[in-house]
Image (tube, rainbow, N blue to C red):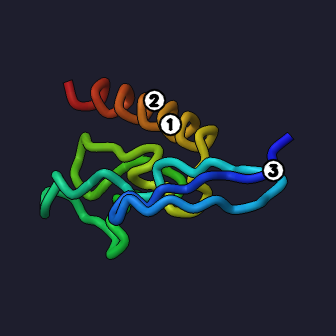
Amino acid sequence: FVTGVRLTDTVTGEERTVDCKGVFMAIGHTPNTAFLGDALPLKPTGYMVVEAGSTKTGVPGVFGAGDVMDDTYRQAVTAAGTGCMAALEAENWLAENE
């Protein structure tokens, strides 16, 4: 059983223990999009702008999926799902633009 968790501040290195009965790990809450610069439209929070219900970005042939575009659910299962969507949309785009 979980009785607590030891946390380390990644800036200061300070460690502390928090008593708790459960732990939920969160990953991917900061989209890794800084390298894109102005190449793609981004939200103020850094997430890619995609068409509603799609993974299409504002650049033809470029698709966003997972932690770089999902600022709502931010779960591994939705990252996998949008990854599948992006793969299928990319396949369709390539077939139409040969």
- In the picture, which quadrant includes the N terminus? top right
Residue 72's place in the image compared with 26, above or below, is below
Quarter of the image for the C terminus: give it. top left
Residue 84 in the image: above or below residue 1:
above
Could you tell me residue 39's position as x and y percent?
14, 57
Which residue position is annotated with label 2? 88
Res 1 label: none
Residue 97 occupies quadrant? top left
Q: Which residue is tagged 1?
A: 85
> Quarter-wise, where is residue 94 in the image?
top left
Q: Is residue 71 above or below residue 76?
A: below
In this rendering, position of residue 92 left or right of residue 94: right
Residue 41 falls left or right of residue 86: left
* Identity of the residue drawn at 64% across and 59% down: 17
Element under label 1?
Answer: helix
Whole-percent x and y of residue 64?
37, 46
* Residues at marks 3 and 2, CA–CA distance in whole angstroms: 44 Å
Name the residue: 48% across, 56% down. 8
Pick whichever, 26 or 69, lies toward us: 26
* Mark 1 to mark 2 CA distance (whole Å): 5 Å
Mark 1 and mark 2 residues within 8 Å of each other at the beta carbon: yes
Choose the circle earlier in sequence order: 3 or 2. Answer: 3
Disc 1 residue crowd, few under 14, some 14–19, many 20+, Cα 10 Å = some
Residue 41 seen in this snapshot: yes
Query: Which label was assigned to residue 3?
Result: 3
Instruction: Identify the mark nearer the N-term, 1 or 3.
Output: 3
Q: Residue furthest left?
A: 38
Residue 51 visible from this viewpoint = no
Q: Amino acid at mark 2?
A: Leu
